[in-house]
Image (cartoon, coloured by chain):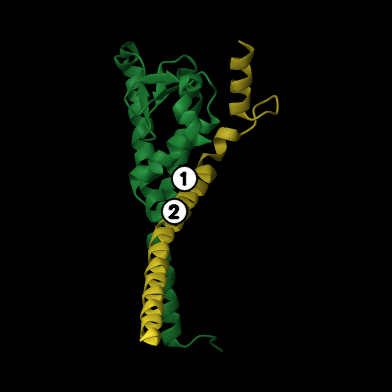
Chain colours: A yellow, B green
Amino acid sequence: MKFFSCLLAAGFLLAAAGCWTLTVRHKIDPIYITMDVNVKAEKQLNEFFDFEDQRDSSGTPANTTRKKIEKEK
Amino acid sequence: MNTFDHKTRGTLFFLALFFLVTLLPAQDAKGGIKERMKGRFAKINDLKKSGKIGETPQGFLEAVKPKSAGDSAIVELLTAENNDRKLLYGLIGKDSETSEEEVGITNAKRIFQKAPETDYFKSADGVWKKKKNMTVEKTEQE
């Protein structure tokens, strides 16, 4: 009787452990995929808009110059 | 003498044709958009600096003040820029297997990070604020 109770308890524990592992996997995968897609799009956007960082006549990137002027004001 | 047999040459020809038909037009389109955007870049920067136009959370430009919205030169510039941005978001979305809207939001975040503190941004509730006053959005970016 004691042996069967132990066997039953072990069975429940294994089943619970199995369910828990499945839940974690389902939660992690979509996050990874979304991040990957965003990084891909962001990289392409950065490459496309490289002209925004082109250096002006003074040798500093265009956006930096704009920031500097506005800070001085 | 021939390196490839008739069948292999045929396959290679169709592969080359496939790449020409699918990849080159996309590259051409992107190149054209880039040139047009480059041409408008200085004007857009000036209008942003004067507080007449700002960026929306969807990655598009809009007039901040009603007076600017009635200026035909500004409206024309904004329409041209937004049309090109829409095309670009579509192309990048296709490449990175995501939606046009998602690319637009990503670009809005990119622009926000690079912008000076005095540039205007439309908040999620539709109110125009200077970057320095957008504390909630700033925290989200970090």
Which element is circle 2 on? helix
Where residue B39 appears, x then y in whole percent? 48, 30
Residue situated in front as seen by the camera: B135 or B25 = B135
Q: Residue furthest right?
A: A59
Three-letter code for the amino acid on which mark 1 is drawn: Gly
Q: Which residue is mark 1?
A: B31
**Image mark 2: chain:** A
Q: Relative to B72, is A51 on the left or the right?
A: right
Please give left or right for residue B22 compared with residue A56 in the image.
Answer: left
Q: What residue sits 36% from the left and 81% below the top?
A: A5
**Residue B110 at x, y = what percent?**
49, 37
For mark 2, what is the residue? Answer: A37
Mark 2 crowd level (few <14, some 14–19, many ≥20, 10 Å Cα): some
The answer to whether any part of residue A24 appears in the image is yes
Residue B17 showing in the rendered view: no
Q: Is residue B16 above or below residue A44?
A: below
Which of the two residues, A30 or B121, is positioned nearer the viewer here?
A30
Q: What residue lies at 47% left-to-right and 35% top-to-bottom?
A: B140
* Picture quadrant where residue B96 is located: bottom left
Numbered circle sitting on residue B49:
none
Q: Dot 1: within a 10 Å radius of its alpha carbon, few (fewer than 14), some, or many (20 or more) residues?
A: few
Please give the name of the residue rendered at 64% of the width and 13% of the height, measured from the top-left corner.
A72
Residue sitting at x 37%, y 69%: A19
Q: Closest to the observer: A66 or A3?
A: A3
Q: Quadrant of residue B82?
A: top left
Q: Are marks 2 and 1 in contact (CB under 8 Å)?
A: no
How many callouts does the rendering have? 2
**Inter-mark Cα distance, 2 to 1:** 23 Å
Quadrant where the N terminus of chain A is found in the figure: bottom left
Q: Position of residue B80 (x, y in %)?
A: 35, 31
Q: Among all residues in the image, which is located at the extreme front?
A: A1
Q: Quadrant of the C terminus of chain A?
A: top right
